[in-house]
Amino acid sequence: MGKELVVVAISGGVDSTVAAYLLKQKGYEVVGLTMCFNLDNSLEKNKFCCSGKVVEDAKRVCDELGIKHYVINLKEELKKWVIKDFLNEYQLGRTPNPCVRCNQYIKFGILLKKAISLGARYLATGHYAKIEKIKDTNFYILKKAKDKLKDQSYFLYRLGQKKLRHILFPLGAYTKKQVRKIAKELGLEVADKLASQEICFLMNSDYRQFLKNYTHHQIKPGLILDTQANILGKHQGIAFYTIGQREGLGIARGYPLYINKIDPKNNRIIVGKKEEVFKKEFLIKKPHFILKPLKKKIEVKVRIRYNHKEAPAEVIPSEGKIKVIFKKPQFAITPGQSAVFYDKDIVLGGGIIDKVLD
């Protein structure tokens, strides 16, 4: 009987390269598969993603590891499942998280299906997270990585049982420092390669320029008001702003002003003092739970964006929706972002922040 086949999503970076190496060391037959997203000529200049250099780097590391390498073009799929939503959400005054959708629909949707169609039992990636099987059951749980500073479980909360059983995260038990050390010991060129930017299809992380390129004719200037409805100035279009933002408002006051609310219906932005941006309650839409749906109130810790330190809250099912109530107000609860629920290191699930309640 031959070795068990694993397809590894290879980006040409240190994380996916070391993930492939670790699996090969465990005795798997490893194949590298690189996603290509060439959107247009301007984006092909991006040194991190969507470029020929990425494919070349991925091919080189696969040659160094002695594994086969394939490339799959998912340009149209990225546009359909990620970029379309990214543009729509910003135009509605919301702040989307494209990495969550990419993981849901592209990496662990289309790419996972492709891996299985090639005869692989697993798709592996360089994500920092853990998947564990619950003892004496056929159920799996998603957990935080060993390296809490690099933990990416927040972006993976929409994975379900059918997918978790076919996914491997070899780096879950390693720190980034350990991963770089392994790469250096192997003499791999990628050992000191810079980490990729968070949103791969953006040039220099400039989402505003991306919006201008694709939706400039749809974005309209409007008014900036304070919480008492006094007109303070004009904005360039609600798509260019987000809750909690302080810079770039073009308003001079004797104290700092922060975006408190975005009103897409009236194309207005409401600003106020920092303390006014702290809120406790919000509703989520499109809830997803990894083990079972929520039927009664639970007390957990909730993270409302990737770099937010999760805080204690009640999560309450209510008339087909789910309400979250923090014990203490949190800064800049932002519609469009994901709220992810944790029980210690275990990811229970989450949903997309839909409406913040005053």
Image: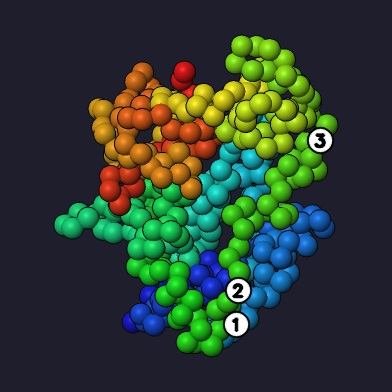
- Nearest-to-viewer mark from 3 and 2: 2
Q: Are marks 2 and 1 in contact (CB under 8 Å)?
A: yes
Question: Residue under circle 3?
Answer: 216
Query: Which of these two is toward me, 216 or 134?
Result: 216
Q: Earlier in the sequence, mark 1 or mark 3?
A: 1
Does 226 sit left or right of 330 as displayed? right
State if disc 2 and disc 3 touch (CB < 8 Å): no
Say which residue label 1 marks. 189
Figure check: 261 above or below 198: above
**Residue 209: which quarter of the image?**
top right
Amino acid of disc 1: Glu
Please name the amino acid that badge 2 sits on.
Lys
The x, y position of residue 142, in whole percent, is 34, 53
Q: How crowded is mark 2: few (under 14 residues within 10 Å), some or many (20 or more)?
A: few
Secondary structure, mark 1, is: helix
Label 1, residues with CA under 10 Å away: few <14, some 14-19, many ≥20: some
Q: Name the secondary structure under disc 2.
A: loop
Residue under pointer 2: 193
CA distance for labels 2 and 1: 8 Å
Residue 197 lies, with reference to residue 221, above or below; the image says below
Please say whether residue 313 is visible from this viewpoint: yes
Q: Position of residue 237 (x, y in %)?
A: 75, 29
Q: Which mark is residue 284?
A: none
Q: Which residue occupies 56% across, 43% down?
A: 97
Query: What type is the residue that disc 3 sits on?
Result: His
